[in-house]
Amino acid sequence: MTQPARKVRVRFAPSPTGPLHIGGVRTALYNYLFARQHGGELVFRIEDTDSTRFVPGAEEYIIEAFRWLGIEFDEGVSFGGAHGPYRQSERRDIYRRYMRQLLDEGKAYIAFDTPEELEVRRKETENFQYDAHTRNSMRNSLTLPAEEAERLVAEGAQYVVRFKIEPDQDITVHDLIRGDVHVNSSVLDDKVLYKSADDLPTYHLANIVDDHLMQISHVIRGEEWLPSAPLHVLLYRAFGWEDSMPAFAHLPLLLKPDGKGKLSKRDGDRLGFPVFPLEWKDPATGAVSSGYRESGYLPAAVINFLALLGWNPGDDEEILSLEALVDKFDITKCSRSGAKFDYVKGQWFNREYLQRTPDAALAPAFDAVLRENGIEAPMERVEAVVGMMKMKKISFIRELWPLCDFFFISPQTYTTEDKFVRKNWKAETAGEMRTLAALLKDVSPFDVENLRQAVDTWTETSGVKPWNAWRVCLVGTGKGPDMYELAAFLGKAETLSRMERAIQALSEGQA
């Protein structure tokens, strides 16, 4: 892998228009991996130039999501740095200066066309485009006398500033994933760079200026921004910044798990998986959308899962820590085609990470589940249950409760209607369990090692195989961990009490 010629500085620049989509998380992750691999820096910038779409709480949500995921930024909004401010709405004076430069050099012009006038032209001309072929028939500073244009601005008439694109220029976008992309400028329209209505630039001007001033070396973003790349190349040329132009890498889209098209929230609602990193409550409607954190996913599992959607390390290894991903990541090996969002694979990753996570780290989450079910237990006992049961085929901690409620609640009924009970409780079983109970009374200390030695010795001499019937006594059915671990956890008094109740209930045929 070749080392970049200049210091690597990348940025993630979301808009605070709502919750962060999981596709945006993947884009941020790839920026992070690329920066860390090359000893570079990751900048967090907020694109809030579209004031009409601002949603309260969205910016804080985005920051909290990355904090949970463990993706760390080096500078930016809430992190500080030498290139601020990093919120675009706070950079108006900077953008005005560069907009004025383009106007003064004749590379941009002021357009006064109203939305209604533009709509008329679109109806009159199929595939109407505001460009070199049509601009001279529109109402702008190229067609109006200079005094009239100045008067309109002075009187507060609303206007936009458009980039003046010269036709028939060859543009090449050097893309690290897709190779060279060639476009002729004649297919581009004169994009709006600034709107007087809110005194803010559009995405196109703001991003180019910010990337230049913040010394961004590589722009890694979603495939949907590829059509804007030729325009950005032209803007770099217009400002004379060709030598500082960043390298581009346009990532493949995340696609629906089934069918065609890109992944949407509706797909998650329909198939039962989150598309946002954290739970989101819409401040306008109160509607709640599920999040990976609240659904019980581990952040490391989400990171690992997302990293392999559109890129792979070139081997069969799937479980990769963040450090391993940094080491193996190669932006040039990303797929050009979209990646199917295999949410079932995401659940598999979570299961793998659950099994690899220390019991103590999982215990607080299971303790919360216990409390929801009215159980309060010392944390060391919660941790012990997690250790005994997490290797079961569960994908989320919440799935432990129905598998191990018996650790905290003794069986309320013993019935031969249960298939496991019927199979393992015979006429002679009650007597065998009484013998086993008498044996257990003398085991001290009542721990796994002593239980195993006492019971195994008895089974060898007696020929009795008591484990399934013993499980019936302690659990009420055919689930649970190793019997010695279970009995040791319950303790001598609870173990003997459950055995006595089971023997009585099943001997009397009670349900």
Image (cartoon, grey):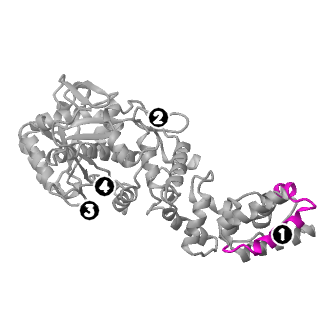
The reply to whether dot 3 and dot 1 touch (C-beta < 8 Å) is no
Q: Which residue is mark 4?
A: 72
> Eyeballing the image, is 176 above or below 349?
above
Mark found first going from the N terminus, 2 or 3: 3
Circle on res. 502:
1
Mark found first going from the N terminus, 3 or 1: 3
Disc 4/disc 3 C-alpha distance (Å): 12 Å
Q: Which residue is mark 3?
A: 78
> Eyeballing the image, is 48 above or below 386?
above
> Eyeballing the image, is 112 above or below 407?
above
Give the main secondary structure of the magenta stretch: helix
Number of residues whose C-alpha sits closer than 10 Å to that of mark 4, classed few (under 14), some (14–19) or many (20 or more): some
Disc 4/disc 1 C-alpha distance (Å): 55 Å
**Which residue is rendered at x = 38% and y = 47% of the image?**
24
Disc 4/disc 2 C-alpha distance (Å): 28 Å
Identified by mark 1, the residue type is Ala
**Which residues, given as a range, are shown in magenta?**
419-445
Of circles 3 and 1, the one toward us is: 1
In which quarter of the view is residue 148 placed? Answer: top left
Q: Position of residue 365 (x, y in %)?
A: 53, 65
On the rendered structure, is 128 left or right of 158? right
Q: Which residue is mark 2?
A: 316
Mark found first going from the N terminus, 4 or 1: 4
Of circles 4 and 3, the one toward us is: 4
On the rendered structure, is 215 left or right of 373? left
